Protein backbone atom coordinates (compact mmCIF):
# COMPACT_ATOMS: atom_id res chain seq x y z
CA UNK A 1 0.00 0.00 0.00
CA UNK A 2 1.47 3.37 -0.98
CA UNK A 3 0.89 6.58 0.94
CA UNK A 4 -0.77 8.65 -1.78
CA UNK A 5 -4.28 9.98 -1.18
CA UNK A 6 -6.43 10.98 -4.17
CA UNK A 7 -9.74 12.84 -4.41
CA UNK A 8 -12.01 12.23 -7.43
CA UNK A 9 -14.57 14.99 -8.05
CA UNK A 10 -17.19 14.21 -10.72
CA UNK A 11 -20.98 14.55 -10.86
CA UNK A 12 -21.24 11.07 -12.43
CA UNK A 13 -21.47 8.81 -9.38
CA UNK A 14 -20.85 5.63 -11.37
CA UNK A 15 -17.67 7.08 -12.88
CA UNK A 16 -16.46 8.12 -9.42
CA UNK A 17 -16.95 4.60 -8.12
CA UNK A 18 -15.20 3.04 -11.12
CA UNK A 19 -12.20 5.34 -10.73
CA UNK A 20 -12.15 4.79 -6.97
CA UNK A 21 -12.18 1.00 -7.35
CA UNK A 22 -9.43 0.89 -9.97
CA UNK A 23 -7.16 3.40 -8.25
CA UNK A 24 -7.56 1.57 -4.95
CA UNK A 25 -6.52 -1.62 -6.76
CA UNK A 26 -3.25 0.22 -7.49
CA UNK A 27 -2.79 0.83 -3.77
CA UNK A 28 -3.98 4.46 -3.52
CA UNK A 29 -6.35 5.77 -0.86
CA UNK A 30 -9.24 7.31 -2.77
CA UNK A 31 -12.16 9.53 -1.72
CA UNK A 32 -14.93 10.80 -4.00
CA UNK A 33 -17.21 13.84 -4.19
CA UNK A 34 -20.07 14.38 -6.63
CA UNK A 35 -19.77 18.17 -6.80
CA UNK A 36 -17.24 20.90 -6.22
CA UNK A 37 -19.40 22.16 -3.37
CA UNK A 38 -19.13 18.79 -1.65
CA UNK A 39 -15.38 18.59 -2.28
CA UNK A 40 -14.72 22.07 -0.89
CA UNK A 41 -16.16 20.98 2.47
CA UNK A 42 -13.31 18.47 2.82
CA UNK A 43 -9.80 19.10 4.11
CA UNK A 44 -8.20 19.25 0.67
CA UNK A 45 -4.71 19.73 2.07
CA UNK A 46 -4.62 16.00 2.92
CA UNK A 47 -4.64 14.97 -0.75
CA UNK A 48 -1.65 14.34 -3.00
CA UNK A 49 -3.69 14.62 -6.20
CA UNK A 50 -7.11 15.85 -7.36
CA UNK A 51 -9.01 14.44 -10.36
CA UNK A 52 -11.50 17.17 -11.30
CA UNK A 53 -14.36 16.97 -13.78
CA UNK A 54 -14.60 20.25 -15.69
CA UNK A 55 -18.34 20.32 -16.40
CA UNK A 56 -20.15 20.23 -13.04
CA UNK A 57 -22.92 22.31 -11.41
CA UNK A 58 -22.62 25.90 -10.25
CA UNK A 59 -18.93 25.50 -9.45
CA UNK A 60 -17.06 24.03 -12.41
CA UNK A 61 -13.80 22.15 -12.17
CA UNK A 62 -11.98 25.21 -13.53
CA UNK A 63 -13.57 27.46 -10.89
CA UNK A 64 -12.77 24.99 -8.12
CA UNK A 65 -9.15 24.81 -9.26
CA UNK A 66 -8.94 28.61 -9.20
CA UNK A 67 -10.33 28.64 -5.64
CA UNK A 68 -7.86 25.96 -4.53
CA UNK A 69 -4.90 27.89 -5.90
CA UNK A 70 -5.82 31.01 -3.92
CA UNK A 71 -5.39 29.07 -0.66
CA UNK A 72 -1.77 28.69 0.45
CA UNK A 73 -2.57 25.34 2.08
CA UNK A 74 -3.82 23.79 -1.17
CA UNK A 75 -2.24 25.80 -3.99
CA UNK A 76 0.46 23.20 -4.72
CA UNK A 77 -1.80 20.14 -4.93
CA UNK A 78 -1.44 18.53 -8.39
CA UNK A 79 -4.61 18.56 -10.52
CA UNK A 80 -5.70 16.38 -13.42
CA UNK A 81 -8.77 17.70 -15.26
CA UNK A 82 -11.29 15.23 -16.69
CA UNK A 83 -13.67 16.51 -19.34
CA UNK A 84 -16.06 15.44 -22.06
CA UNK A 85 -14.97 18.48 -24.08
CA UNK A 86 -11.79 18.22 -26.11
CA UNK A 87 -11.08 21.66 -27.52
CA UNK A 88 -7.85 23.62 -27.63
CA UNK A 89 -9.37 26.49 -25.63
CA UNK A 90 -10.43 24.18 -22.80
CA UNK A 91 -7.04 22.52 -22.73
CA UNK A 92 -5.29 25.91 -22.61
CA UNK A 93 -7.63 27.06 -19.84
CA UNK A 94 -6.81 23.96 -17.84
CA UNK A 95 -3.06 24.34 -18.18
CA UNK A 96 -3.23 28.08 -17.51
CA UNK A 97 -4.96 27.22 -14.23
CA UNK A 98 -1.97 25.07 -13.31
CA UNK A 99 -3.26 21.68 -14.40
CA UNK A 100 -0.69 18.91 -14.32
CA UNK A 101 -2.55 16.87 -16.93
CA UNK A 102 -5.79 16.82 -18.92
CA UNK A 103 -7.82 13.69 -19.81
CA UNK A 104 -10.71 13.70 -22.29
CA UNK A 105 -13.72 11.40 -21.98
CA UNK A 106 -14.15 8.67 -22.99
CA UNK A 107 -10.86 7.34 -21.64
CA UNK A 108 -9.39 3.97 -20.78
CA UNK A 109 -8.82 3.20 -17.10
CA UNK A 110 -5.32 2.09 -17.98
CA UNK A 111 -4.62 5.56 -19.41
CA UNK A 112 -5.93 7.26 -16.25
CA UNK A 113 -3.79 5.07 -14.00
CA UNK A 114 -0.67 5.72 -16.09
CA UNK A 115 -1.27 9.47 -16.04
CA UNK A 116 -1.92 9.46 -12.28
CA UNK A 117 1.33 7.61 -11.68
CA UNK A 118 3.23 9.99 -13.96
CA UNK A 119 1.92 13.12 -12.22
CA UNK A 120 2.59 11.74 -8.74
CA UNK A 121 6.08 10.71 -9.81
CA UNK A 122 6.81 14.22 -11.17
CA UNK A 123 5.37 16.12 -8.22
CA UNK A 124 6.82 13.96 -5.45
CA UNK A 125 10.38 15.14 -6.10
CA UNK A 126 10.67 17.80 -3.42
CA UNK A 127 7.95 16.67 -1.02
CA UNK A 128 10.40 14.61 1.02
CA UNK A 129 12.85 17.47 1.43
CA UNK A 130 12.81 19.91 4.29
CA UNK A 131 11.13 23.25 3.50
CA UNK A 132 14.30 25.09 4.54
CA UNK A 133 16.32 23.69 1.67
CA UNK A 134 15.49 22.42 -1.82
CA UNK A 135 18.09 20.36 -3.63
CA UNK A 136 18.38 19.19 -7.20
CA UNK A 137 21.79 17.58 -7.71
CA UNK A 138 24.32 20.44 -7.28
CA UNK A 139 21.62 23.11 -7.23
CA UNK A 140 20.76 24.09 -3.66
CA UNK A 141 18.14 26.66 -2.65
CA UNK A 142 18.42 27.79 0.97
CA UNK A 143 14.97 29.24 1.65
CA UNK A 144 15.55 31.05 4.99
CA UNK A 145 18.80 32.63 3.77
CA UNK A 146 17.38 33.40 0.31
CA UNK A 147 20.55 32.00 -1.19
CA UNK A 148 21.20 29.72 -4.17
CA UNK A 149 24.42 27.78 -4.68
CA UNK A 150 25.59 25.87 -7.75
CA UNK A 151 28.05 23.12 -6.88
CA UNK A 152 28.98 25.05 -3.76
CA UNK A 153 29.33 28.48 -5.37
CA UNK A 154 26.70 31.16 -4.71
CA UNK A 155 24.64 32.36 -7.69
CA UNK A 156 23.88 36.13 -7.55
CA UNK A 157 20.12 36.02 -8.10
CA UNK A 158 17.82 39.00 -7.78
CA UNK A 159 14.77 38.75 -5.50
CA UNK A 160 12.43 37.99 -8.41
CA UNK A 161 14.82 35.45 -9.97
CA UNK A 162 15.07 33.68 -6.61
CA UNK A 163 11.29 33.57 -6.20
CA UNK A 164 10.76 32.23 -9.74
CA UNK A 165 13.33 29.48 -9.19
CA UNK A 166 11.80 28.60 -5.82
CA UNK A 167 8.31 28.40 -7.35
CA UNK A 168 9.43 26.13 -10.20
CA UNK A 169 11.65 23.92 -8.04
CA UNK A 170 8.93 23.44 -5.43
CA UNK A 171 6.61 22.22 -8.21
CA UNK A 172 8.89 20.13 -10.42
CA UNK A 173 7.21 19.10 -13.66
CA UNK A 174 4.30 21.50 -13.25
CA UNK A 175 3.82 24.12 -15.97
CA UNK A 176 3.23 27.72 -14.88
CA UNK A 177 1.87 30.24 -17.36
CA UNK A 178 3.20 33.79 -17.40
CA UNK A 179 -0.02 34.84 -15.65
CA UNK A 180 0.61 32.26 -12.91
CA UNK A 181 4.15 33.51 -12.35
CA UNK A 182 3.04 37.15 -12.33
CA UNK A 183 0.36 36.38 -9.75
CA UNK A 184 2.64 34.34 -7.48
CA UNK A 185 5.87 36.36 -7.74
CA UNK A 186 4.79 39.93 -8.54
CA UNK A 187 1.46 39.66 -6.67
CA UNK A 188 -0.44 42.97 -6.83
CA UNK A 189 2.48 45.13 -7.86
CA UNK A 190 2.25 47.86 -10.48
CA UNK A 191 1.52 46.77 -14.06
CA UNK A 192 4.10 44.29 -15.29
CA UNK A 193 4.50 43.11 -18.90
CA UNK A 194 4.53 39.41 -19.78
CA UNK A 195 7.89 40.14 -21.42
CA UNK A 196 9.26 40.79 -17.92
CA UNK A 197 8.81 37.08 -17.14
CA UNK A 198 10.77 36.03 -20.23
CA UNK A 199 13.62 38.40 -19.39
CA UNK A 200 13.86 37.13 -15.81
CA UNK A 201 13.73 33.49 -16.95
CA UNK A 202 16.52 34.12 -19.48
CA UNK A 203 18.74 35.73 -16.81
CA UNK A 204 17.92 32.99 -14.31
CA UNK A 205 18.89 30.25 -16.75
CA UNK A 206 22.29 31.86 -17.31
CA UNK A 207 22.94 32.36 -13.59
CA UNK A 208 22.26 28.75 -12.61
CA UNK A 209 24.62 27.39 -15.25
CA UNK A 210 24.18 23.75 -16.25
CA UNK A 211 20.81 23.63 -14.47
CA UNK A 212 19.39 26.40 -16.64
CA UNK A 213 18.41 23.82 -19.24
CA UNK A 214 16.10 22.21 -16.67
CA UNK A 215 13.85 25.30 -16.88
CA UNK A 216 11.86 24.27 -19.93
CA UNK A 217 9.56 26.38 -22.10
CA UNK A 218 6.25 24.72 -23.01
CA UNK A 219 5.21 26.73 -26.06
CA UNK A 220 1.75 28.20 -25.61
CA UNK A 221 1.62 27.14 -21.94
CA UNK A 222 4.51 28.50 -19.89
CA UNK A 223 7.53 27.30 -17.95
CA UNK A 224 8.44 24.37 -15.73
CA UNK A 225 11.44 22.85 -13.96
CA UNK A 226 11.88 19.45 -15.56
CA UNK A 227 13.96 16.72 -13.95
CA UNK A 228 15.93 14.22 -15.96
Image (cartoon, rainbow, N blue to C red):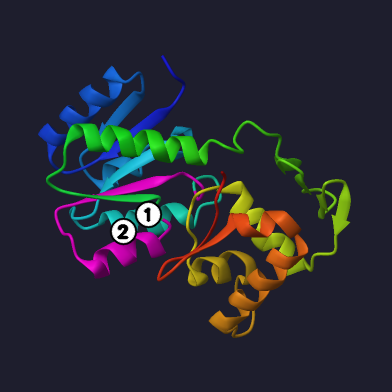
Residue 54 vs residue 195: left or right?
A: left
- Which dot marks residue 62? 2
The stretch of residues the image draws in magenta is: 75-98
Do the CB atoms of the residues marked 1 and 2 lie less than 8 Å apart? yes
Residue 87 position (above or below residue 171)? below
Residue occupying image coordinates x 36% and y 41%: 50
Instruction: Say what secondary structure mark 1 lies in.
Output: helix
Residue 122 position (above or below residue 58)? above
Q: Which residue in the rendered view is the most extreme toward the front? A: 210
Q: Report which residue position mark 1 lands on.
A: 65
**What quarter of the picture does the N terminus occupy?**
top left
Q: Quadrant of residue 131?
A: top right
Residue occupying image coordinates x 77% and y 67%: 159
Q: Is residue 110 magenta?
A: no
Q: CA distance from mark 1 to mark 2?
A: 5 Å
In percent of width and height, residue 15 lies at: 14, 35
Instruction: Say what secondary structure mark 2 lies in.
Output: helix
Q: Which residue is nearer to you in this view: 47 or 170? A: 170
Amino acid sequence: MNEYRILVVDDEEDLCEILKFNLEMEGYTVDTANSAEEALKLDLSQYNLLLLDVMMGEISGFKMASMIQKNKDTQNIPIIFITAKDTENDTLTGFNLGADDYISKPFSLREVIMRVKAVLRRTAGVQTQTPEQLVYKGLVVNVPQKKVTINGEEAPLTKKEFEILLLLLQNQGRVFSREDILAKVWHDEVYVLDRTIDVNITRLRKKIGEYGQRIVTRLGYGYCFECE
